[in-house]
Amino acid sequence: MERKHKLILVIGLISLSLLTIIFVTILFCRRRKTGNVNRDMEEAELECKEVDVVVNTADLIKFHGGEDLTVHEILDAPGEVIGKSSYGTLYKANLVNINSITLLRFLRPTCTLRSKEVMPIVEMLGSMRHQNLVPLHAFYAGSRGEKLMVHPFYGLGNLAQFIKDGKGEAHKWPTICKISIGIARGVNHLHTSLEIPIIHGNLKSKNILLDHYYQPYVSDFGLHLLMNPSVAQQILETSSSQGYKAPELIKMKDANEESDIYSLGVILLELLSGKEAINENPIPGQDFYLPSVMRSAILDDRISDLYHDDILLGVSNDRRVVIEDGILKYFQLAMACCSPSRSLRPDMKQVLGMLEEIEKVSLL
């Protein structure tokens, strides 16, 4: 009888141990899946070899739209990693207390300037407000040199994915016009609203965010200003590999207004063609630098190959002529933006005016 009780006790202890192991395993897996920004930032810090000297680390700098944010909620927010680069990590975070989804950008300490150099730039970026720019709601500099930028989250994702998915709305002429004009308005504000223009430096379709009404928001503007020189140059090189880098930047290091316009021209061609821009070496003797899928159609004088038939789907013959003329003017504008000579490219105000005129005439 005593042996029987001992056997039951042993089985009970083993069962309890197994249940404990299973519970701890499930808890660990759930924590890894959900995560929070603070822990992920701490893990990222282990990879850093240097730490900035940081000033005013205790304060969260808030701008319009971020008045209700707190450091505690931002750092402890459950976050999902939606993008990574050599200089930082992008999170989609749920701020439970204020019932808001937000975009958190963590910048690695070794990649950014010292905080006392960063703060004036942050103040300037935080003051930028336009209906087609992604606003900076808050900025946090931690005690180990980590830096965190807080932005609103837009539900439709980025323009590159929108074009790649190829859904019907992406091929509609009114939507193409709306997105193009919105991007141009945002970049024009960067170039003209202050005494010294803010150069984007990394304008590409992945850095254009969309809401559910297909309203575009230019993101990542001025980000290179926060980086040390080597990382800022790396950002430009990444842009080059993806097809958005103006040819003069092969010899010049600094991005400029004209190089932003070149990048915009490539985005316009992406919108028109529904195809991704991929940088390739230009063919000798050609007077433009464009991805091959776009270049071949242009060389063969097949402009119709650059847009989907869906653009003209259901359009009457009378309207078809007007829209086709608008498409031609849109294409010619994109090509002017992509001129290999920066002096021949239109400025952003001219680009915006021409896009608005194209929309006005072709959508009457």
Image: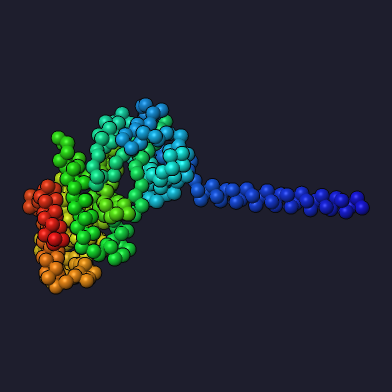
Please say which color scheme the image uses: rainbow
Visible residue check, residue 77: no
| Whether residue 235 is situated above or below residue 167 in the rendered picture | above
- Report the residue at 42% width, 31% height from top: 143
| Whether residue 283 is situated above or below residue 113 in the rendered picture | below
User: In the image, 318: left or right of 10?
Assistant: left
- Report the residue at 76% width, 49% height from top: 13
| Whether residue 29 is situated above or below residue 46 in the rendered picture | below
Image quarter where the C terminus lies is: bottom left
- Residue 309 position within the rendered picture, expressed as x and y whole percent measured from the top left: 22, 71
Q: How many marks?
A: 0
- Residue 313 position within the rendered picture, expressed as x and y whole percent measured from the top left: 22, 71
User: In the image, 167: left or right of 341?
Assistant: right
User: In the image, 53: left or right of 3?
Assistant: left
Q: Nearer the viewer, residue 46 or 149?
A: 149
In the image as oriented, which residue stretches furthest toward the right?
A: 1
Q: Quadrant of residue 125?
A: top left
- Residue 240 position within the rendered picture, expressed as x and y whole percent measured from the top left: 23, 53
| Whether residue 137 is situated above or below residue 296 in the rendered picture | above
- Residue 206 position within the rendered picture, expressed as x and y whole percent measured from the top left: 29, 53
Q: Nearer the viewer, residue 236 or 172?
A: 172
- Report the residue at 62% width, 48% height from top: 24
Visible residue check, residue 1: yes
- Report the residue at 40% width, 35% height from top: 69
In the image as oriented, which residue stretches furthest toward the left?
A: 344
User: In the image, 50: left or right of 167?
Assistant: right
In the image as oriented, which residue stretches furthest toward the top?
A: 56
